[in-house]
Amino acid sequence: MDAMPVTFSQEMSAWSAQIQDAIEQYEQSMTKIQQLAIGGTAVGTGINADPHLSEKCCKHMNNLTGMEFKPANNSFQAISSQDAALILSSSNKTLAVALTKISNDLRWMNSGPLGGLGEITLPALQPGSSIMPGKVNPVIPESVCMVAGKVIGNDLTITHAAQSGNFQLNVMLPLVAHSLSESLSLLSNACLSLADKAIKDFEVNQDNIESMLSRNPILATALNATIGYETGAQIVKKAYQEKRSIIEVATEMTDLDSKTLAELLDPVKLTRNQ
């Protein structure tokens, strides 16, 4: 069902906030993934290893990578569990879910041109349908949704692998590493594609949006405080049945002049609770 209007900047601010939350979750997961079990040797006791091996290795790796690796707080736990990998995988899933939401919003807004919303036009990246001439599919949002499905599946795979440790041994580390690496690579490419080939250059269909707004009965919500709910509902019903604009019908059914109605029903003001 239709609800109150929002601006494109408001909609995109929601996308931005979702991505920022995902970034913050990644940053938190890094504090765990950078704790290494190295130096714990076979079972966490550090048998046959230099007592300072873990510190020396972490320092050397930090110099090479610019990362902040450090010895795990508990080498027995670090060897026997894959909690850090699981936390990172959860961050992947969070981002995948956010990208799916954004992609689906884009697909809905791009739907049409006549049988859908038609609020935006995404860049055409392919000739079109092999069956229907001129039909252009939202291939980037669609591909991002497929990536998200794969990442969510990989998260379940990593969950299964992480719970398969027995005492101080987990033989499924190759599966964890492969799934994490694949998900990170897929998400990285998906983010770039969605930003550069979909969001960056989509066009807003201003005329279509204004036409839909002017005829949308939901605008009468703004009149509740002035004319009351019941009268507003009657205006909505009449406008919808007769396929006329709210302002036109409200002019006939209330004592408000067209200028006052135009101010009350201004969609921009409705997005600011004015």
Image: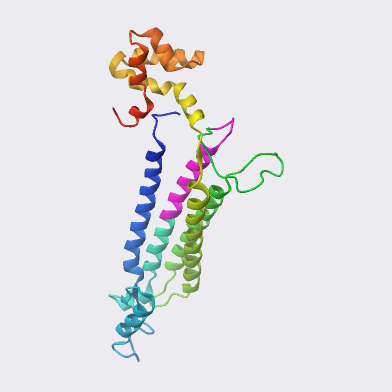
The answer to whether 208 is drawn above or below residue 145 in the figure is above
User: Residue 203, how many percent across, how many down?
Assistant: 51, 40
**Image quarter (top left, top right, bottom left or bottom right) of the N terminus:** top left
In this picture the colour scheme is: rainbow
Q: Which region of the structure is painted magenta?
A: 94-116
- Magenta span includes 114: yes
Q: Is residue 52 above or below residue 17?
A: below
Which residue is drawn at the image coordinates 58% and 48% (left, top)? Answer: 139
Q: Residue furthest right?
A: 131
Most common SS among magenta residues:
helix
* Nearest to the observer: residue 154 or residue 142: 142
Q: How many marks?
A: 0
Q: Residue 90: where, in percent of width, then height?
A: 40, 59
Q: Seen in the image, is 141 located left or right of residue 48?
A: right
Residue 166 falls left or right of residue 51: right
| Residue 183 relative to residue 91: left or right | right
> Where residue 92 appears, x then y in whole percent?
43, 59
Please tell me whether residue 121 is drawn above or below residue 97 in the rendered image.
above
Residue nearest the viewer, comparing 154 with 105: 105
